[in-house]
Image: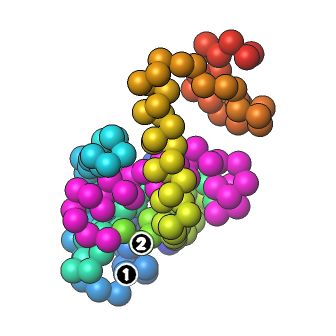
C-alpha cells in the first residue's frame, strides 16, 4: 500500500492497511485516549483496531523501520510498548502486537509486544517513580548515542 508522503494515511488507506494484517472483523478508532494506571501513563494513540479477541494499536510515524527500531530507537520501542499496555488496560483486551506505519518509508510492519519488552517498560516506570519520590537526579546514560535524541539535552548537566 502506498500513501502520500509527508501526509498521514487517510481513513480509507488505514482500513486497507489494517485489513492486510487482521483476518477477523474489526472496528477502527482514531485518536484514542488511553490510560494505564499500573504504569501511571496516559495519552492518545493514533488508532486502535478492535476485534472480538484483541486490540491492536496503530502507530503512525513519519519514518521508521524494524531495523531502526531495533538498533537506534529504544525510546520509540518504550513508547510503543507503553501505549500497548495502556490500550490493554483501557479496553480490557489483550494486546499482542502493534502495527507501525512509516509514512515516508511507505511501509507497515508488525511489532510483537513480548514479555521482555513488557517487563522492561514496567521496570522503567518503577525507576521513574523512584526518581520522582526520592527527588534524586538519575545518573547520565552510559551511551552517549542516546543523548542525540534526548528531549533534555538542552538542560542536561552532562552536555
Ligand atoms: S542528554 Fe542527559 S538526560 Fe538526555 S540521555 Fe543524555 S545524559 Fe540522559
The spot of residue 105 in percent (x, y) is: 61, 58
The spot of residue 142 in percent (x, y) is: 76, 34
Q: Residue at x 46, y 31 (%)?
A: 130
Q: Which residues are magenta?
A: 66-94
Q: Is residue 116 left or right of residue 32?
A: right
Furthest residue to the front? Answer: 134
Up the image or down, 76 lies above or below 152; here it is below
The spot of residue 9 in percent (x, y) is: 41, 57
Ligand 1 falls in quadrant: top right
Q: Residue at x 26, y 80 (%)?
A: 53
The residue carrying pointer 1 sits among few (fewer than 14), some (14 to 19) or many (20 or more) residues within 10 Å by Cα, namely few
Q: Helix or strand or loop: what does disc 1 sit on?
A: loop
Q: Is residue 114 left or right of residue 52?
A: right
Say which residue label 1 marks.
22
**Quadrant assignment, res 24:** bottom left
Q: Main secondary structure of the magenta part?
A: helix
The residue carrying pointer 2 sits among few (fewer than 14), some (14 to 19) or many (20 or more) residues within 10 Å by Cα, namely some
Amino acid at each position: 500500500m502506498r500513501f502520500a508522503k509527508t501526509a498521514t494515511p487517510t481513513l480509507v488507506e488505514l482500513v486497507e492497511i489494517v485489513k492486510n494484517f487482521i483476518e477477523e472483523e474489526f472496528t477502527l478508532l482514531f485518536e484514542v485516549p488511553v490510560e494505564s494506571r499500573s504504569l501511571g501513563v496516559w495519552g492518545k494513540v493514533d488508532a486502535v483496531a478492535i476485534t472480538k479477541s484483541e486490540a491492536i494499536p496503530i502507530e503512525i510515524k513519519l519514518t521508521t523501520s524494524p531495523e531502526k527500531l531495533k538498533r537506534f530507537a529504544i525510546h520509540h520501542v518504550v513508547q510503543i510498548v507503553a501505549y500497548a499496555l495502556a490500550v490493554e488496560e483501557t479496553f480490557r483486551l489483550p494486546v499482542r502486537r502493534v502495527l507501525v506505519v512509516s509514512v515516508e518509508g511507505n511501509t507497515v510492519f508488525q511489532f510483537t509486544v513480548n514479555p521482555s519488552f513488557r517487563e522492561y517498560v514496567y521496570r522503567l516506570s518503577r525507576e521513574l517513580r523512584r526518581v520522582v519520590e526520592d527527588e534524586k537526579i538519575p545518573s547520565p546514560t552510559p551511551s552517549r548515542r542516546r543523548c542525540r535524541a534526548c528531549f533534555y539535552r538542552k538542560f542536561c548537566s552532562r552536555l
